[in-house]
Amino acid sequence: MLGSVAAIETFGTVDGPGIRTVVFLNGCKLRCKYCHNPEMWHMQEKNITPEELANRIIRNKNYFGNNGGVTFSGGEPLLQVSFLIEVCKLLKKENIHIALDTAGVGLGDYKEILSYIDLIIFDVKYTTKDGYKNLTGLDIKESLNFIEIANKLNKKFWIRQVIIPGVTDSQEYLESLSLFLKSINNIDKIEFLPYHKLGSEKYDKLNLVNPYKDILEMDTDKCDDLYNKFMKDYISN
C-alpha cells in the first residue's frame, strides 16, 4: 500500500498543540473558492509506504514533548483513509498524539480511522446548505455526517473558520456559526483565520481561474475584533 504525500513539515507550531510534524496528503473533493493549495486537489503519484511515513514521523518524536505529535492535513486526508489507518497503527505503538485537519469530506467510512485520532481540527466552510454549495461546489451532507460520527465517538474538536470579507464576516453569518457549533460536541478551541492571498500565484501557474482574485484580504485587526466579540457571545450563550 502506498500513499500520496505532497509535503512534510517538521517543527510545525500552528496545526495542533505543541511542536508537530505536519503531513500534507494529496487529493480533495472540495473546490473552495478561497483555497490556497489547489495543487493538492488531484491525487498525485503514490510515493510513500505507511512504514516509511511512520518512521519519518517517529524520528521527530523527541521534539514533540508532552503535547506535540503529528497532524495529517491536505488536501483532504480522509481521501486516503486506508493508508492513513496503517500509518496511525504504527504511530500509536509509539504513543504519538495524532491530529486530523479535515473538512470531513472523504470516502464516508470514518469510524475506524477516528479510533486512532486524538484531535480533530475541523475546517468549517460555511454553515448553510446553499452557502456551502456555493463556496465549495459540494453538498454539506458529507461534512455533517462526519460530525455526527465524531460526536458519537466523543472526539475532541478544534474549530477553524476562515473569515472572508463580504462572505463570512457579517454578524448574520457569525450568528449562524454560533448555532452551527452547537451541533458539535467537545469543542476545545475555536480559531478565526483571516483570508489571505498567499496562494494566488498558484492559480496562474496551474492555469486555473481564481474565483476570489478580486476579493481583498481580511484585515487581521478586524478579524481579531470579530473573534473576540464572537467568543464573548458564544460563551455567554
Image: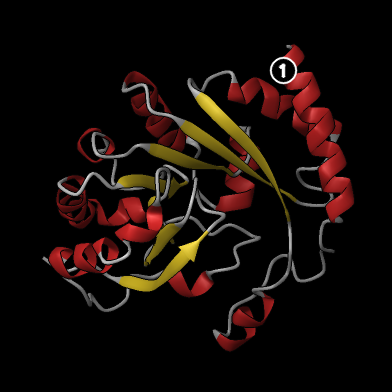
Relative to 152, 32 lies left or right: right
Q: Is residue 114 visible?
A: yes
Relative to 89, 171 lies left or right: right
Q: Residue at x 54, y 69 (%)?
A: 37
Viewport quadrant of the N terminus: bottom left
Q: Residue at x 76, y 43 (%)?
A: 168
Label 1: element kind: helix
Give 217 or 57, whichever is nearer the viewer: 57
Amino acid under disc 1 = Ile
Rendered position, 25 above or below 95: below
Using the rendered view, name the quadrant where residue 79 is placed: bottom left
Q: Position of residue 220 (x, y in %)?
A: 83, 54
Q: Is residue 28 visible?
A: no
Viewport quadrant of the C terminus: top right
Q: Position of residue 146 (x, y in %)?
A: 38, 33
Crowd band around label 1 with a 10 angstrom C-alpha radius: few (<14), some (14–19), many (20+): few
Q: How many marks?
A: 1
What's the colour scheme? secondary structure
Give 141 or 205, whichever is nearer the viewer: 205
Using the rendered view, name the quadrant where residue 32 is placed: bottom right
The residue beneath circle 1 is 235
Q: Residue at x 28, y 36 (%)?
A: 114
Rendered position, 237 above or below 218: above
Q: Position of residue 69 (x, y in %)?
A: 37, 51
Using the rendered view, name the quadrant where residue 189 is placed: top right
Q: Position of residue 64 (x, y in %)?
A: 39, 54
Residue at the left extreme? 1
Q: Residue at x 20, y 73 (%)?
A: 48
Residue at the top extreme? 237
Give 91 or 217, whichever is nearer the viewer: 91
